């Protein structure tokens, strides 16, 4: 039998067509090229900033206030204000964002038009350019409510800016909790409130926290809305809730606009500080996601 | 008459079937999902300290029906229950009945084990905690686990996550979780369909002991399982509407398990249990 089979199939497995292998390689090359563009841009940016900024990176940058003399200038009020804004942002966005997400996922009847309308609008809000939020802040918070050009106004407008992101992330985290968990809790005689508060929310905290931190890191880097609600570059005192304020991206923006090269170097150093803050936040988010992720 | 069915494993009626008090008295129950009628004209009663099994082909409404008893259908948008179900004489769907209160007395175990993403201890303690049964919580957790024949396997790792348990252990954990709130009735919706034969046997043994304290209703795809565990068995089937588009579940026959499996009075029951259909 075997001899016969061998005789009937004398041809060995061939090499395949050269043209097909060529296109396969070409495609792979294109993929690597695409990857390289993004990667080299980012690398070039980082290297340039590091070369320019590291010589000016000093304790003075973190501890001193702004000055017209670049040798004495620092970004302390700006850094503190950014941290302050970040803390306020979390305090404002998380309760409101999670509350909205819980309503939409757990309570809203999906067959009602107004709930679908709300959902659609939240998705649209996430795509509104940040400068538009800045205009809203200027018109509504600074002038309308008469809050003035203060840190609280900046924190509130950034809250509005990232709220849709937090809502969307929280909804996804809540939706990821399987229905069998809710059913199991209901079957034991738990009320809706108990099911949400004691099962659904604890199970979705990792996702909510990760989404909130990523939203925060986006807000910390925002400049445009803060410019409109009146962040000023030259603030020599530590920020207060209802005082005029600056923020790290604003400070960088102003320093770069100065004619002196020393200020440009300071700006590069401040960019390093800002990058470290943002990458640190992102690292926390990634760590939390990996550490607490629930596999169902 | 039915050689395939290992009649020797059938129990003689362990108790006089009419002896127990009526727990559920259903009269002309129908269930709708939106406009589609999933189940109609079910009239039957469920007796105390018995295991009552619902069998039938897919789509015959047996799972729909079991979910009427703890008002889980209330959670499904558009679901509607007609007719009356009396629970110890009280209208379960009466205006003064809170479904949450009903579920405290009538527990449920689901098809797929659904432990909470918490420790073994917290899984069991969840029910007592939300119902305010805070006295001697440790003792309550231990008793529930012993009842569910799981205590010896988990007593040294109560703080471990319940997801580390095997499928059969997870299902017994869900039974323990259900027992921990001292229910009157335990509903089981195909509790063994996701389990291996050994775990299935463990859960069947468990049912035999649990019925001394609880009334058990079980939905099962597995006829032998019904024959092994149930005192009384209800056979449901699918009825097509005249235009053939709508499938509605109906109760065909409800009797002592032995009678259903050895001498059914309806031709459809006989066809189903002899494997000629379904």
Image (spheres, coloured by chain):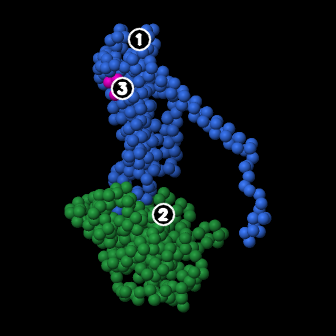
Q: Are marks 1 and 3 in contact (CB under 8 Å)?
A: no
The residue beneath circle 2 is B80
Q: Quadrant of the N terminus of chain B?
A: bottom right
Q: Report, in whole angstroms, how far the alpha carbon at label 2 lies from the one at label 3.
A: 55 Å
Q: Nearer the viewer, mark 2 or mark 3?
A: 3
The residue beneath circle 3 is A82
Q: Residue at x 46, y 41 (%)?
A: A168
Q: Nearer the viewer, mark 2 or mark 1?
A: 1
Could one spot residue A147 in this view of the protein? no
Could one spot residue A34 in this view of the protein? yes
For label 1, count other residues whose C-alpha is less than 10 Å away and answer few (under 14), some (14-19) or many (20+).
some
State left or right for residue B46 relative to residue B155: right
Q: Report, in whole angstroms, how far the alpha carbon at label 2 lies from the one at label 1.
A: 75 Å
Q: Which residues are magenta?
A: A79-83
Q: Earlier in the sequence, mark 1 or mark 3?
A: 3
Q: Is residue B32 magenta?
A: no
Q: Considering the numbered disc 2 on the image, is that residue within a helix, a strand or a loop?
A: strand
Chain under disc 2: B
The residue beneath circle 1 is A262
The one nearer the camera, B19 or A5, is A5
Q: Quadrant of the C terminus of chain B?
A: bottom right
State left or right for residue B227 relative to residue B122: right
State left or right for residue B147 relative to residue A25: left
What chain is the blue one? Answer: A
Q: Quadrant of residue A157?
A: top left
Q: Main secondary structure of the magenta part?
A: helix
């Amino acid at each position: 039998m075997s001899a016969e089979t061998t005789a009937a199939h004398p041809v060995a497995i061939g090499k395949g067509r050269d043209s097909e292998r060529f296109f396969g390689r070409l495609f792979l090359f294109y993929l690597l090229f695409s990857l390289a563009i993004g990667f080299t841009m980012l690398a070039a940016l980082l290297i340039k900033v590091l070369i320019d900024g590291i010589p000016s990176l000093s304790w003075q940058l973190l501890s001193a206030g702004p000055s017209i003399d670049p040798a004495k200038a620092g970004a302390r009020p700006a850094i503190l204000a950014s941290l302050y804004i970040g803390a306020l942002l979390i305090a404002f966005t998380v309760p409101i964002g999670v509350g909205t997400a819980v309503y939409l996922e757990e309570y809203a009847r999906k067959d009602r038009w107004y709930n679908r309308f709300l959902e659609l609008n939240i998705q649209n809000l996430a795509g509104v350019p940040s400068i538009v939020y800045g205009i809203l802040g200027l018109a509504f918070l600074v002038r309308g409510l008469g809050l003035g050009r203060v840190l609280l106004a900046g924190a509130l407008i950034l809250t509005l800016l990232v709220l849709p992101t937090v809502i969307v992330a929280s909804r996804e985290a809540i939706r990821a909790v399987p229905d069998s968990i809710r059913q199991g809790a209901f079957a034991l005689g738990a009320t809706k409130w108990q099911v949400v508060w004691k099962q659904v929310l604890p199970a979705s905290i990792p996702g909510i926290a990760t989404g909130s931190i990523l939203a925060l890191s986006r807000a910390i880097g925002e400049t445009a809305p803060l410019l409109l609600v009146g962040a000023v570059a030259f603030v020599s005192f530590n920020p207060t809730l209802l005082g005029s304020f600056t923020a790290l991206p604003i400070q960088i923006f102003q320093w770069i606009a100065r004619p002196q090269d020393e200020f440009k170097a300071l700006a590069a150093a401040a960019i390093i500080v800002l990058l470290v803050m943002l990458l640190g936040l992102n690292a926390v988010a990634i760590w939390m996601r990996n550490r607490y992720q629930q596999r169902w | 008459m039915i050689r395939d069915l290992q009649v020797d494993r059938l129990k003689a009626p362990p108790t006089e079937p009419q002896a127990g008090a009526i727990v559920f008295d259903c009269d002309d129950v129908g269930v709708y999902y939106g406009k589609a009628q999933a189940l109609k004209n079910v009239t039957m009663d469920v007796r105390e300290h018995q295991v009552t099994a619902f069998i039938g082909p897919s789509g015959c409404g047996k799972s729909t029906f079991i979910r009427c008893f703890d008002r889980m259908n209330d959670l499904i948008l558009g679901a509607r229950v007609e007719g009356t179900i009396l629970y110890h004489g009280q209208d379960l769907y009466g205006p003064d009945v809170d479904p949450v209160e009903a579920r405290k007395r009538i527990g449920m175990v689901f098809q797929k084990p659904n432990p909470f993403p918490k420790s073994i201890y917290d899984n069991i303690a969840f029910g007592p905690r939300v119902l305010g049964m805070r006295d001697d919580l440790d003792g309550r957790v231990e008793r529930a686990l012993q009842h569910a024949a799981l205590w010896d396997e988990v007593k040294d790792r109560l703080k471990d996550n319940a997801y580390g348990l095997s499928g059969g252990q997870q299902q017994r954990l869900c039974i323990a979780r259900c027992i921990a709130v001292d229910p009157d009735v335990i509903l089981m919706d195909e509790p063994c369909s996701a389990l291996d034969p050994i775990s299935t046997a463990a859960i069947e043994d468990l049912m035999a002991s649990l019925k001394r304290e609880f009334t058990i209703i079980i939905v099962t795809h597995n006829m032998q399982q019904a024959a092994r565990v149930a005192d009384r068995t209800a056979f449901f089937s699918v009825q097509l509407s005249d235009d053939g588009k709508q499938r509605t579940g109906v109760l065909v026959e409800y009797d002592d398990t032995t009678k259903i499996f050895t001498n059914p009075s309806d031709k459809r029951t006989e066809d189903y249990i002899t494997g000629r259909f379904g």
